[in-house]
Each structure stands twice: as C-alpha cells, then as structure tokens.
Amino acid sequence: MNAASTLGGARWRRDFDWLMAGAALLVGVLGLFQVYSATFNTKFQSAFSQHVVWLVLAVAVFAAVSHVNYRHLVSLSPVMWVVGVLLLVAILLLTDPVNGSRRWLPLPFGLSVQVSEFMKVVLLLVVAKYCAGSATKMLRLQDFLRAALPFFAVFLLVVLQPDLSTSLSMLPIAATVLFLSKIAKKHWLLGALALVLLVPLLWASLKPYQRGRIVGFLSPDDAPLGIGYQIRQSKIAVGTGGMWGQGFVQGSQTQLRFLPTPHTDFILAAFAEERGFAGIAIVLGLYYVLLLRIVDTARSARDPEGTLLAMGVASVLLFHIMVNGGMVVNKLPVTGLPLPLMSYGGSNLLTVAIMLGIVNSVRIRRFVN
C-alpha cells in the first residue's frame, strides 16, 4: 500500500504543496530557456537537451520523494551516510582528476554524478535524526557529537576533493541545527572552535585558482585577465540588461562569448542581460514564494524532525541564491556555486528536487499520525 492510498487520494492531493511545486517548476523552466540561449551555437549546445532530461527526471524524483514518508528516510540516514562516505573515499582514491579535482563518480553511458551534492540531503537527514529531540530538551553532548562527527567527516572529504563551493554549502545545515536546537553554551564554543581550526586546513587545501578567486574578489582590477575578467564581464552583462533586457538570445555579452560559463556559474548574469531588471524581479519573486512555503511547512510540521528538515532545506537554498547572486555583481567571491533550479547540472538539480520532495512529504503528513 503506497503513501497516497494510506492518506487517501483526495486528501493527499489537497495537502500537496502545489504552490511550492509550481514556483519551483517555473524557475526550472526559466532556467531551461536560459541554458538554451547561453549555449546557442556553441560547443555546449547539447547541454540544452541534456538539461531537458534532467528537468523531467527532477520532476519525477520530486513526486516520488513526496510519496515517501520522511520519517522512513530519517531512520535510514545512517546507512545512507555510510554508503555516501564510501563513495566519496572511492572517488578520492580511484578516479582521475578533472581540472585538478576529484568530484565525479563515473557511470555507464558516459554519465557521471557529483556525490557530494547528494550528501547534503544525507547530512540533513542525519542531523534531523540525532538532534530532533533538542526541540523539547537540552541537547546532550552525545547527541551533539553523533550529529557533528558525521557532518565534519563528510565536510573534510569534500574539502579534500577539493570542492570549496559544495563544502561551504553544507555549513548552513549545521548553522540551522545550532540555531534551532537547545545547545549548552559550552557546546556552542566547541562547535565554533572546530570551525576555527578547520579554516587553515581549508585554505591549505585550496588550489591556486581558488585562492585567486578570493584575491580577485578583493582586488578585481589587479587581475584583469583572470578572475577579475569574469567579474567585470558579469557586471557589464547585468548592467546592459536595463529594465527589460536585450531579448531572448540577444544578449551581447552572452552571445559574443565575453561572459564566462553563462549556463552554469553566471547564468543569473546572462538572464539579467536578456530579461533585465523585470526578469530578475520575477525570478527573485518566485524564489521568495518557494522559500516562504518551505518555512511555512517547517512551522506546521507535526514533529521536530520535520521542522529541522524543512528549515535545513530553506537555509541551503537561501545560501545558494545569496552566494550566486552576490557573486555575479562582485559582492561575494566567485565560488562556482550553482543557482538552484536554474544552473545547468543534473546532480544539483536532482538534489534540489529531493530536498523539495522531502519538504513536501513533511507538509503532506503534518496532520497524519
């Protein structure tokens, strides 16, 4: 018997968050058209057809995860964590580096997945399992360590790949749990000390080009042909969009290939150039609706696990949106962090679909014993 029949078909459809799903799908469709425009008549033109497949698959994954009881996923999280860690270790030891990093797990038919992206979901489930009881009582040290140690193990493995952007995007999960949990001051200090100690290791693990991104952010004019070039072209693209944009497949910086990676890291800059301030306002409005629905689900969740999961998803998505948006206008360093639901990339798109499916599962079951 599936979840829909258990809840009752009519009730399941009523409690399904159609507004959240609709907002997410609209952002995904806008991203799909932007990927087409950004890769038009380039060697990356096949990215559009691939992204169509990923988007259809993401919709199916979202619906499937919505049917699954999120408590079952929480109970299985330790097994998922072990499998994920083994895959991360295998990637570090057995795969060949691509552009100086070992991030991708090769699959048949020439496909590959970025396991570290999916580990965000696993970490959300793990911390929900071990920290949910803190909503009603003070979090014990053993509970804190059972959640912190798996988190830092995954974090360090991703840092060693090295993958700065993905490792940083895991930090909002920890911040959400610390914010929502009743943790003694000494445990706060313990967590803060661990993060401080990780900073030198994180910096030492960075490749020269990653350190250059930070330097280029602080002084873009000192690196006109490197990261400074990317930032300047991104700002030009955003500025030339004006109020209404230059039109679909009409952006000068994008179509003349001045803007780097316009279908991945800088897709928001390409979108701003072609759709202008009005288009950006629509996209940000859709993100606002999406985040608002997730937070509303967290508030109405029937148990602490549901609250932690929903708020964790909200914090991860908000982090991605803020960092990617700040990056394209030189308010934050270039990190390669994708824009959720818009940037080309199957691993991140499927990860977001799983996260939203979990949130929808929490919402559907908020009135079910």
Image: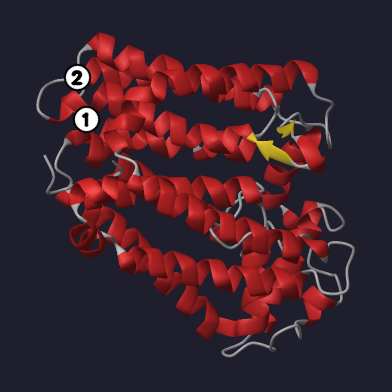
Q: From the viewer's perspective, tell me whether residue 68 is left or right of residue 14.
A: right
Residue to which mark 2 is pinned: 139
On the image, the x and y values in percent for residue 284 come to: 45, 71
Q: Which residue is drawn at 72% across and 63% down?
A: 263
Q: From the viewer's perspective, tell me whether residue 14 is left or right of residue 253.
A: left
Quadrant of the rendering where the C terminus is positioned: top left
Q: Amino acid type of disc 1?
A: Ser
Asked whether disc 1 touches disc 2, contact meaning CB atoms under 8 Å apart, the reply is yes
| Looking at the image, residue 323 lies above or below residue 107 | below
Residue to which mark 1 is pinned: 181
Q: From the viewer's perspective, tell me whether residue 146 is left or right of residue 299.
A: right
Q: Amino acid type of disc 2?
A: Leu
Q: Which of marks 1 and 2 is nearer the N terminus?
A: 2
Q: How far apart are marks 1 and 2 (CA)?
A: 7 Å
On the image, the x and y values in percent for residue 74 come to: 33, 29
Q: Say few, some or many: other residues with alpha carbon within 10 Å of mark 1 (under 14 / 14 to 19 / 20 or more).
A: many
The image quarter containing residue 92 is top right
